[in-house]
């Protein structure tokens, strides 16, 4: 079976706000927190039969030192090294903050036409993600299963993660509302 080609997507801001209202673990795009201009950008993968968008973020200082864990994956740049010779982290995939999506709430980013200042960075991150599709997909599916089927097994992890089942219900309601208004 041919593996799907990963791409980057923007997620509709109104939809992200609906999700955030239902679950504080959804990354905010609120004007009150100064995040209104920040797009919700991520990779879309299939989890069971549902599509999920894994947010792509810049590495924070505390995540530079830590290793990738079950709920996030560091994206290294093999061309750039730190003082110890290790690849620098250029991005983070926040598996714990992934959100359910449908075609109605996402827009593919065409990096060949992009003029944003971080275009080259996004191209490098996307290349790494495509090269490591199996790792990303396996880790995301394991996390989804752990959080949805065994939430009490690791309560700290469950607290850091979005409530995936609850957000799936929000998506369903959002899509129904969209259908009524069209």
Image: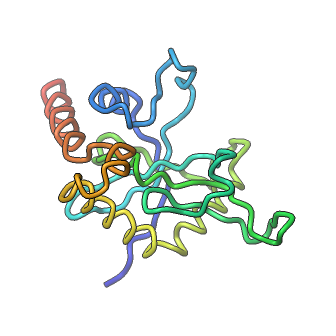
Q: Residue at x 36, y 81 (%)?
A: 2
Residue projecting furthest to the right: 83
The image position of residue 64, as x and y in percent, is: 68, 54
Above or below, 21 against 71 in this view is above
Above or below, 11 against 158 in this view is above
Q: Residue at x 79, y 70 (%)?
A: 79
Q: Say which of 118 and 59 sits in front.
A: 59
Image quarter (top left, top right, bottom left or bottom right) of the C terminus: top left
The image position of residue 18, as x and y in percent, is: 30, 27
Residue 52 located left or right of residue 49: right
Image quarter (top left, top right, bottom left or bottom right) of the N terminus: bottom left
The image position of residue 43, as x and y in percent, is: 45, 55
Q: Say which of 84 and 78 sits in front.
A: 84
Residue 147 located left or right of residue 161: left
Colour setup of the view:
rainbow
Q: Say which of 134 and 180 sits in front.
A: 134
Quadrant hosting residue 50 = bottom left
The image position of residue 85, as x and y in percent, is: 82, 72
Q: Residue at x 56, y 32 (%)?
A: 38
């Amino acid at each position: 079976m041919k593996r799907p080609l990963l791409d980057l997507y923007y997620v509709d801001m109104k939809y992200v706000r609906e999700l955030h209202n239902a679950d504080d673990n959804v990354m905010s795009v609120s004007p009150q927190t100064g995040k209104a201009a920040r797009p919700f950008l991520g990779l879309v993968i299939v989890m069971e039969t549902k599509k999920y968008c894994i947010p792509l973020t810049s590495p924070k200082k505390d995540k530079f030192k830590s290793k990738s864990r079950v709920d996030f994956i560091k994206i290294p740049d093999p061309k750039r090294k730190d003082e110890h010779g290790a690849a620098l982290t250029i991005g983070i995939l926040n598996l714990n903050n992934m959100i359910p999506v449908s075609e109605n709430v996402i827009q593919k980013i065409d990096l060949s036409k992009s003029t944003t200042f971080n275009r080259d960075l996004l191209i490098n991150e996307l290349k790494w993600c495509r090269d490591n599709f199996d790792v990303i997909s396996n880790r995301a599916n394991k996390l989804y299963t752990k959080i949805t089927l065994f939430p009490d097994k690791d309560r700290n992890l469950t607290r850091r993660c979005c409530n995936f089942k609850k957000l799936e219900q929000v998506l369903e309601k959002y899509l129904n509302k969209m259908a009524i208004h069209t």
